[in-house]
Image (tube, rainbow, N blue to C red):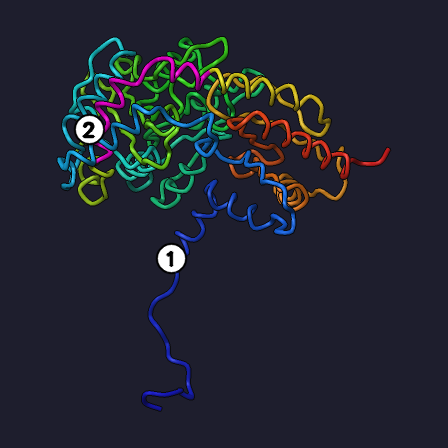
Amino acid sequence: MENGTTTSRRTWNFKENEKLVSVSDLTVRSVLNKLKCCIDPADTRPVIPLGHGDPSAFPCFRTTPIAEDAVSDAVRSAKFNCYSSTVGILPARRAVAEYLSQDLPYKLSPDDIYLTSGCGQGIEIVLNALARPNANILLPTPGFPYYEAWGGFTQMEMRHFNLLPEKEWEVDLNAVEFLADENTVAMVIINPGNPCGNVYSEQHLKKVAEMARKLGILVISDEVYAHLAFGSKPFVPMGIFGSIAPVITLGSISKRWIVPGWRLGWLVTNDPNGILKEHGVIDSIMGYLNISSDPATFIQGAIPQILQETKDDFFSKIVYMLREDADICYERIKDIPCITCPSKPQGSMFVMVQLHLNLLEDIEDDLDFCAKLAREESMIILPGVAVGLKNWLRITFACEPSYLEDGFQRLNAFYQRHAKKQ
């Protein structure tokens, strides 16, 4: 009847976007949200958050006052209440170009810099810019699932090459060559590594560039953890090999400055030979930027001061704390028989460990392990399946050392409770 309850069900013409629902299940955020729902609300202990790379909640990882003052100054100046230009405001792009050029054999121009809302939007932009019918992209396993999500959403075919744990997670270049064909557009590397905590040598990166040139593809180098290297190998930007093969570098202030919530990143074309422009990739990037949102203008306004005035002692302190946390994590892993670590982390904020189900009872797989760990011990660890490696675990070590120690005590107690009886 009119204006009341009808006796027959009305048919509506809208429904969910199945593709969006399915690809969002691949993200770290989605998996961690599900694990958080497993936590027992009756457990009064603090949650041990070893599932994601955001230590900003811990006082020892607070960002530098120089960055905080830069944002405050930008807001109070009233000069940055406006819309940004499509690519980002010129002073910020110039500052990023100067900052990144310090580590390169050539000088970047502001025209090589595109400011983004964090590195995540950089991934979104580059994958949409490269998507075309029948195109495929080569992704690392294990890797960062945001590439999987956006690759699936753009309907680009995703092919996977392994990272080799016995070689400190180097790229399996033989697999890259085997997987590529005439429709392959790019390969992705993440350096320093998420989720593996590895750092690639200059020699290995040169081999990656030479393989990309041989295959006629570009390299997408995710360097969001740039300079967070504390092992025997220094961080080397992939862009130093931009003259061998074109490189699109993704980065941000999120990790080095410990401000992931500020959402300021960059997409950089390391391409001194102009190959990307010649093949229309720059036009595609600009086209996508014209229909997407910009990072907040006042954060852009703060960028010159942040990049130019942050002192080296702040960076050194962050790297020192990460090294200390990584050492604690690596040593405590040895005390828990059901997990093993193939190589000590040398960068970023993570380590991958293999889960040995044969030593456990009532644990089906890595996801079941993490769900029960959350429920029984109020501790969050990311299951390896979320980063493409089933029955492994990604452990974040970037936190207060006391949380790490407490976390591994809980992890050991969980193992003792579920250990297979001899």
Instruction: Name the residue rendered at 23%, 39% in the picture.
Output: 296
Q: Point out residue 289 in the picture as x, y percentages from the top left corner.
A: 21, 39
Instruction: Name the residue rendered at 14%, 28% in the picture.
Output: 90
- Which residue corresponds to mark 2? 279
Q: How many marks?
A: 2
Q: What is the CA distance from the residue labelled 2 to the residue labelled 1?
A: 33 Å
- Amino acid type at mark 1: Asn
Query: Magenta stretch: residue 345 in it?
Result: no
- Amino acid type at mark 2: His
- Which image quarter: residue 150? top left
- Which residue corresponds to mark 1? 17
Answer left or right for 188 relative to 398.
Answer: left
Tell me if I can see residue 281 in this picture. no
Answer left or right for 141 relative to 357.
Answer: left
Quarter placement of the N terminus: bottom left
Query: Magenta stretch: residue 309 in it?
Result: yes
Q: Point out residue 368 in the picture as x, y percentages from the top left corner.
A: 65, 44
Q: Point out residue 325 in the picture as x, y percentages from the top left corner.
A: 55, 21
Q: Which residues are magenta?
A: 298-319
Identify the element where label 1 is drawn.
Answer: loop
Q: Establish if 257 lies above or below 48.
A: above
Q: Main secondary structure of the magenta part?
A: helix
For label 1, count other residues whose C-alpha is less than 10 Å away and answer few (under 14), some (14-19) or many (20+).
Answer: few
In the drawing, what numbered circle is on residue 104? Answer: none
Please identify the residue farthest to the right as the structure is shown. 422
Q: Point out residue 282 in the picture as x, y percentages from the top left corner.
A: 19, 30
Q: Establish if 279 lies above or below 345.
A: below
